[in-house]
Image (cartoon, rainbow, N blue to C red):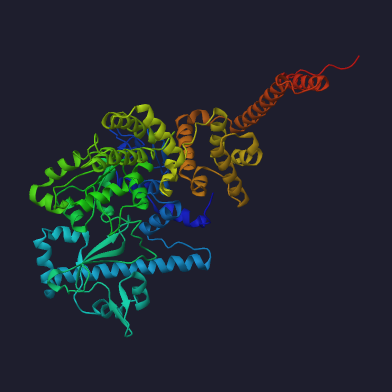
Amino acid sequence: MSSGTPLDDRERVRQATDLVELVGSHVPLERRGRLFLGLCPWHDDSRPSLQVHPERQSWKCWVCNIGGDCFNFVMQWDGVDFRESLRILADRAGITLQRRGSLRREAHDEKANLLRAMSWAQQQYHQWLLEASDAKPVRDYLAERGISTDSIRRFGIGASPTHWQWLIDRSRSTPHNDPILEACGLILASQRGGWYDRFRGRVLFPIRDEQQRTVAFGGRVLPAWARQDEPKYVNSPETKIFSKHRHLYALDLARDAIRKERMAVVVEGYTDAVMCHQYDVKNVVAVLGTALGAGHIQILKRYCDTVCLLLDGDEAGQRRANEVLELFVGAQLDVRVATLPPGEDPAELVQRAGAEALREVIAAAPDAWEHKLRVVTRGVDLTRDTHRAHQALEQMLTMLAKVPRGTPSGYSLQLRQQQMLTRLAHMFRVDESTLRRRLRELSRAKPARSVSKLAQQEAPPEVRPLSLIERECLELLIMGNDVSRQVAETISLEQIEHPAVQQLLMAARELLAEGKVPDYEQLMLRVEDSRLKFVLTDVADAAEAKSDVLLADAQQRFADLVTWLKEREADDQSRRVIADLESQRYDEEEQVEALRRLIEQQRARQGISAPTDG
């Protein structure tokens, strides 16, 4: 339930965080009485559904059934776990977190050192590009590519001179020594001893994480400085702060637009992404010199329902798009593939024809099924070339078999699957029932869930509604008085059916063991699961709405709760006895004994004394 983070860390960070300010930095808020309201960014909201409670420092969306405190707002917004949300908010508040255990502290310190070194390097490269006289060829090159000075500043674009040790020399007066720079991937060991700069003579595109921290660089050689044996592109290697399979270029700048439009547009080049943003198409990200993979799709799923692949118009670009379609289907994401004119990339298109032309290409992009069908049937005579037609049909059915079954988010994909089956039957002149049988065979042979690890990472189940008894239990638990203590000490986990309430009771007992009385704030700090935080927020909202009732004798309410739980337990026992009797598993003597117990239970509930002998 708890990750081991010291509770005073959480308390300090929560106290230093104004939730209204935090939420308001992402969503425009308007005061309405005691609350602040805004449009929820997680559904198509036309009437403000997002509520922020400043006194209780909680938030909630009634439509999405999500809510909680500052920590799980960051968890929801940034798609991170509790520990990362704590770190983000601590950095925001300027708080240094305590660390338990030397290994964890060392790992944290090493990562912090690498991030500081990368931030420093980015500033050096960026400043040199903007101000150095010998960087004029780089500035001219970027101007020729159409990249504005504003975009250079917004994306933090930089450059490195051709000197072998330019960055190393500048680091001598800083804490960023050679081993740190090497661990960042900024310098390389020379065969002759010593070190040299990895990115010398290149235009540098900083790759930032979702918290806008520089974690890597993409380097393109300047044509005027290029040597024959030199690769055109050099990217940062994998490090402890960077993985090309878990980062996307420009996501830090694009994610708000992606969330708003519910669509991410994926391009291949850094310049493509920069130019799209420059022309006000801002929901665009780029892959980092690798194919789009499961890790990237997992990131994009946090922000949108649809991904449009806007890859180069050549055959290789279309082939790359075709290779990842099954991943999207297995991950239950709607994917579309935009086809550019042959030989043209997104940057050239938007400069030649403008943003509206680019948006038209995106809007006209066919979905995964249609794109796949066009690719596999291109140049195939479906009537005469039976072998190739059969291969094309098998490829389509294999992809259709990846559709997940029995999940709400997979429902629309299942409908599209049925439509495509009907179309395939018509195109290939095959009976539809035959295709359905083959589809079932493929689904059984290779379930959709095995497409990738990503497809196995389903969203956590929603918390089912609380019963009246369970809600009353939590309302008494969060009051923060003697009754809260009695609830935590007296109510057993066996008396509660709802798993969320069981976990909150366990958290309350942990607090009691530490000498703390459980209440709303303490429980919110204790639990890390967003679903539990939402349950607490929901109960607190309901309790506040009937505050007059809650001012009644809490002790009497607790006594009533204990009675209700005992009655429910007795009812359950009676039902089990009746079920056993109806199953006819008892012999005659056992039946008599079971009936006697049942009668005694009913007499006890009704306050009737058992008859005495004589």
Q: Is residue 491 above or below residue 236?
A: above
- Residue 97 in the image, given as x and y percentages of width and height: 45, 61
Counting from the top left corner in percent of width and height, residue 136 is at: 10, 71
Q: Nearer the viewer, residue 43 or 90?
A: 43
Seen at 43% across and 49% down, the residue is 453
Q: Is residue 33 left or right of residue 598?
A: left
Q: Which residue lies furthest to the bottom in this view?
A: 192
Residue 301 visible here: no
Q: In this view, does 240 lie to the left or right of 24?
A: right
Viewer-proximal residue among 353 and 485: 353
Locate residue 43 relative to residue 6 in the image: left or right: left
How far across and down, in percent of the image, does residue 574 sit? 70, 23
Residue name at image x 33 percent, y 85 percent: 193
Q: Which residue lies furthest to the top in this view?
A: 614
Q: In which quarter of the image is the C terminus?
A: top right
Q: Horizontal placement of 56 versus 336: left or right?
A: right
Q: Is residue 164 visible?
A: yes
Q: How many labels does the image show?
A: 0
Where residue 243 appears, as percent x and y from the top left, is 36, 60
* Residue at image location 43% in from the left, 68% down from the top: 109
203 over 196 or under it: above or below? above
Picture quadrant where residue 53 is located:
top left
Is 282 situated above or below 31?
Answer: below
